[in-house]
Image (cartoon, grey):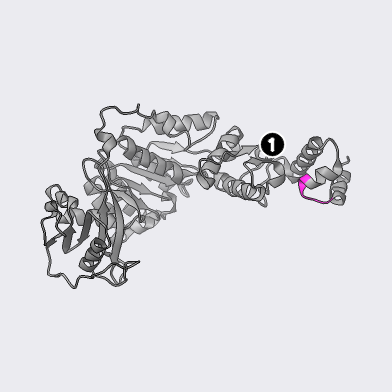
Amino acid sequence: MGDPYSGGVSRTVNTGSNGLSRVHSGPSPTLPAGLSLPEAFHWLLEAGHKDLLGVSEQLLMVDREPAKVLALFGHRELWAWAHDQTQAVMGWQPLPFLDGRPVRLLWTQWTTLGAISGAIFALGAPDVEQATPAQEPAERPGDIFADVVPGTSPAATAIRGQLASWVGRCLCVRVTGPRGVGKDYVARALLSTQERLAPGRLMDPLVVDDPKLIIGEIWSTRVRDAIERGRPLFIRDLHSVPDRDVHVVFEWVTRAVASATPLVVSHAPWASDFSARRWEQVLPEQIRIPELVSRPEDLPELVRALGHATFGQRCDLKLTAGALRLLSGVRWVGNTAELEAVVIDARRRSGTDRLSENWIRLPSGATGGAGLADLERRAVQDALERTGGNRTAAAALLGISRSTLHRRLKAQGV
């Protein structure tokens, strides 16, 4: 095989007993199933892919530019990185290069037990922006979180201030709040911002969706490896750990804190005082996301942000006065998650970015102290005002028949 620096095909470093098998010749519309790592590597080369890095526990294959990786990282370190990356999403992930160049995950191989046994990546171009002398002014931390916690309420402003205070510091914080307030979204955004503002740390966080998994051998090994490598940790739903198992997870969290590993955990209110005391002891700092009903003034900005997240940046959702009054009177048991479902439904039914109360369908049991009758009365009054008292037009706006509107007006004493 040729020299990777002179445009040769590939270089193979075999650290185990597995040898190369047959090489596929001739391109194919899709990569065939059942290939070994060497076969898939050469198939991708012949299909036109360049700058490939193939790695398994026993084998390392590089082509051209990725051969320079060997001067910086050993086979064992690259395999550990590749194995972790394939536990995440297929797509562009950062390789631990000093210049932050990206790679793309092209192929994975799995054992019969469901474990990763090999992966092939394509190396991207270096981040030229880092080498450019003239750069745009850095984004202020407060601006970074404007879309993460939108709104003008004192609570939203305070949360953004707390998030900004962690920029440039080693993360070690709890994100708390009731169900549906967006704890995980805030936690992920905080970790992502740390990576963006601190380019020296290029590893993706290890996300533990169920902290009870840490009790088992597989996930405890992953957490230990992350702590040893300084890889950020995100542990979700810490409140779900039973009291009898708290000591096991507590030990790993304590190790992460002691080793200055970036750590963010999310949890709902504790089920027992025992758990609360233990976790607050090792993670005293917290960012609390309040219930949506306590900050109705954030609704316009929050609805706009939900529109951007669901329908793209070109979507600019706006609430009419009637829609804002209607949503402000809702108890929102499911908080932001429940509001998101209502907003998406209203946007799809209306077909426009201007959401009126006529397109809003509230979930069952979501009304607040005003009660459903009061909310219905407001909607009817708004429709009559907009149509100048024309009941036929008002009924059309409300999506009901004129006779139904007449019965409701009679019941309201109008």
**Residue at the spot x=15%, y=69% of the render?**
20
Q: Residue 382 at what x, y percent from top left? A: 77, 37
| Residue that protrudes farthest toward the front in the picture | 26
Along the horizontal axis of the image, is 283 left or right of 14? right
Give the camera-side residue of 183 and 248. Answer: 183
* Residue 412 visible in the shown view: no
Residue 156, above or below 37: above
Q: Quadrant of residue 320?
A: top right
**Residue at the spot x=27%, y=37% of the render?**
128
- Amino acid type of the residue that numbered disc 1 sits on in the rendered structure: Arg
Q: Quadrant of residue 339?
A: top right
Q: Label the magenta part by its dominant secondary structure.
A: loop
Give the camera-side residue of 280 and 407. Answer: 407
Region rendered in magenta:
397-401
* Residue 314 visible in the shown view: yes
Q: Is label 1 in a helix, a strand or a loop?
A: helix
Along the horizontal axis of the image, is 398 left or right of 136? right
Q: Which residue is mark 1?
A: 325
| Number of other residues with Cα within 10 Å of mark 1, as a class: few under 14, some 14 to 19, many 20 or more | some
Q: How many circles with numbers are drawn on the protein?
A: 1
Q: Residue 51 at what x, y percent from top left? A: 22, 53
Give the camera-side residue of 273 and 110. Answer: 110
Q: Residue 97 at what x, y percent from top left? A: 21, 44
Quarter holding the N terminus? Answer: bottom left
Q: Quadrant of residue 15?
A: bottom left
**Residue at the spot x=68%, y=39% of the render?**
323
**Residue at the spot x=43%, y=37% of the render?**
287
Q: Residue 123 at what x, y percent from top left? A: 25, 51
Quarter holding the C terminus? Answer: top right
